[in-house]
Image (tube, rainbow, N blue to C red):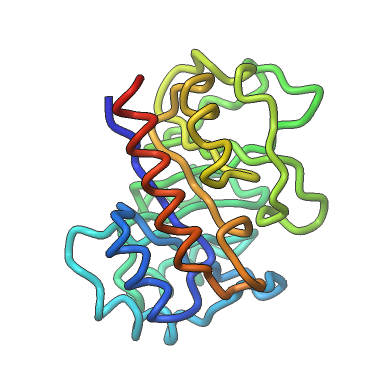
């Protein structure tokens, strides 16, 4: 068993490099202007050029047009487009591979997830109007057994990611706000602890 590790909300080069050094597989850049972790495609591109070629660069979009997504993807050299709003993935087929976010709350049922043609479904906790980054976990056991690849996000850190992996058995995990000292400013010690906790959990699963 292996689990992909994504560190999201990257806004600074030193945080990106610290994530890579810790062993992250993917880094997320948030292109939603209302997010406290918003970064322009041009700034993200400057960070991306300093990354190893095997690090997957994920662009996070909220209700952006296909045209805007295509421009950002080309500017940054994105490997993955993550749709985190109310988008229909069928309108973004040219941007494959796609991840589509789905919020999990107390009323969640696996059959509520549409049959999207995407590489992975990212399951996030409730976030109100923030569209993610709220640091709230959900019932991981409720999503166990969902067909296809799932990425668990929402309120993960080194203290609980092992339990999330054990219960949800995801293809990937994604952490953002709980690895920060302030919005958009990563705590490198928390990043290292998080990645180590993921690898330890995989080793013992």
Dividing the picture into quadrants, the one containing residue 63 is: bottom right
Dividing the picture into quadrants, the one containing residue 50 is: bottom left
Q: Please name whichever residue, 80 or 12, is drawn nearer the observer in this view of the structure.
A: 12
Q: As displayed, is residue 128 above or below residue 199?
A: below
Q: As displayed, is residue 97 above or below residue 117?
A: below
Residue at x-position 38% and y-position 46%: 5
Q: Please name whichever residue, 13 or 181, is drawn nearer the observer in this view of the structure.
A: 181
Q: Residue 91 location, x and y as percent?
A: 50, 49
Q: Quadrant of the N terminus?
A: top left
Q: Residue 122 location, x and y as percent?
A: 53, 39
Asked whether, in this view, residue 53 is left or right of residue 130, the answer is: left
Q: Residue 22 location, x and y as percent?
A: 32, 59
Asked whether, in this view, residue 133 is left or right of residue 66, the answer is: right
Q: As displayed, is residue 31 above or below residue 97?
A: below
Residue at x-position 75% and y-position 58%: 130
Q: Residue 205 location, x and y as percent?
A: 35, 19
Dividing the picture into quadrants, the one containing residue 164 is: top right
Q: As displayed, is residue 48 above or below residue 179?
A: below
Residue at x-position 25% and y-position 80%: 49
Q: Please name whichever residue, 34 or 191, is drawn nearer the observer in this view of the structure.
A: 191
């Amino acid at each position: 068993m292996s689990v992909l590790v994504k560190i999201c909300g990257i806004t600074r080069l030193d945080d990106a490099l610290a994530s890579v050094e810790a062993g992250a597989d993917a880094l997320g850049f948030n292109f939603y202007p209302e997010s406290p972790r918003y970064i322009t495609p041009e700034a993200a591109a400057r960070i991306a050029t300093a990354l190893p070629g095997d690090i997957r660069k994920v662009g996070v979009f909220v209700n952006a047009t296909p045209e805007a997504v295509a421009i950002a993807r080309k500017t940054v050299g994105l490997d993955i487009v993550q749709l985190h709003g109310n988008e229909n993935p069928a309108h973004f087929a040219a941007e494959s591979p796609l991840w589509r976010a789905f919020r999990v709350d107390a009323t969640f049922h696996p059959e509520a997830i549409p049959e999207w043609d995407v590489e992975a479904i990212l399951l996030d906790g409730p976030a109100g109007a923030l569209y993610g980054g709220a640091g709230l976990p959900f019932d991981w056991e409720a999503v166990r057994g969902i067909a296809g690849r799932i990425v668990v996000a929402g309120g993960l850190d080194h203290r609980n990611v092992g339990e999330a992996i054990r219960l949800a058995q995801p293809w990937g995990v994604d952490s953002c706000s709980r690895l920060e000292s302030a919005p958009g400013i990563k705590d490198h010690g928390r990043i290292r602890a998080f990645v180590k906790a993921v690898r330890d959990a995989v080793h013992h699963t």
